[in-house]
Amino acid sequence: ELDRVRSLPTTNYPPYNIKKIDDSKYQLEIALAGFSKEDIDVQVKDNTLTISGKASDDKEKDNSFVYKGIAQRAFKREWTLMDYLKVIDAKFNNGVLIVDMELNLPEEEKPKKIEIK
């Protein structure tokens, strides 16, 4: 479910990675060069992770660029989280937003080994 993005199918902005750290830990990495952490909003509601961003007005009005190849356009992306996958925290470092998630399956949902008699 996590890799099924509910944003517009024609957009791939901003680019992201999904990493499996171990059997219960995952990370979502989103490249957000040119944004500050104040420009980014991370929310979880009803098993949906929503990340949106909008560059501050100061950055949009800066006309000193000769060439501007780093996009800072507003965005909103949503991911459906599977049951029991919880967002633990989010960090922003060197233009990359990292969202840590953990899968906490209840004992009755975990696979059980059946002994063959």
Image (tube, rainbow, N blue to C red):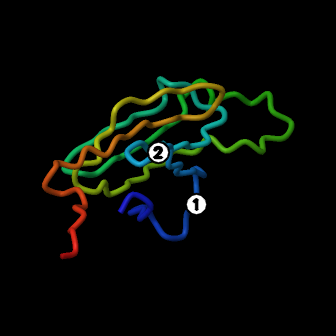
Compared with 23, 41 (above or below) is above
Compared with 31, 80 (above or below) is below
Residue at 56% in and 43% down: 30
Looking at the rendered structure, the kind of residue marked 2 is: Asp
Looking at the rendered structure, the kind of residue marked 1 is: Asn
Give percent across and percent down for residue 34.
65, 32
Determine the image quadrant of residue 65: top right
Which is nearer the eye, 2 or 14? 2
Q: At numbered mark 2, what does the secondary structure look like: helix, strand or loop? A: loop
- Residue 108: numbered disc: none
Q: Which residue is mark 2?
A: 22
Give percent across and percent down for residue 6.
38, 63
- Dot 1 or dot 2: first in sequence order is 1
Q: Which residue is mark 1?
A: 12
Residue at 59% in and 31% down: 35
Q: Are marks 1 and 2 in contact (CB under 8 Å)?
A: no
Compared with 49, 33 (above or below) is above
Q: Residue furthest left?
A: 108
Marker count (numbered): 2
Give percent across and percent down for residue 84.
23, 49
10 Å crowding of disc 2: few (<14), some (14-19), many (20+): few
Q: Nearer the viewer, mark 1 or mark 2?
A: 2
Q: Is residue 113 left or right of residue 24?
A: left
Residue at 63% in and 28% down: 59
Residue at 55% in and 33% down: 55
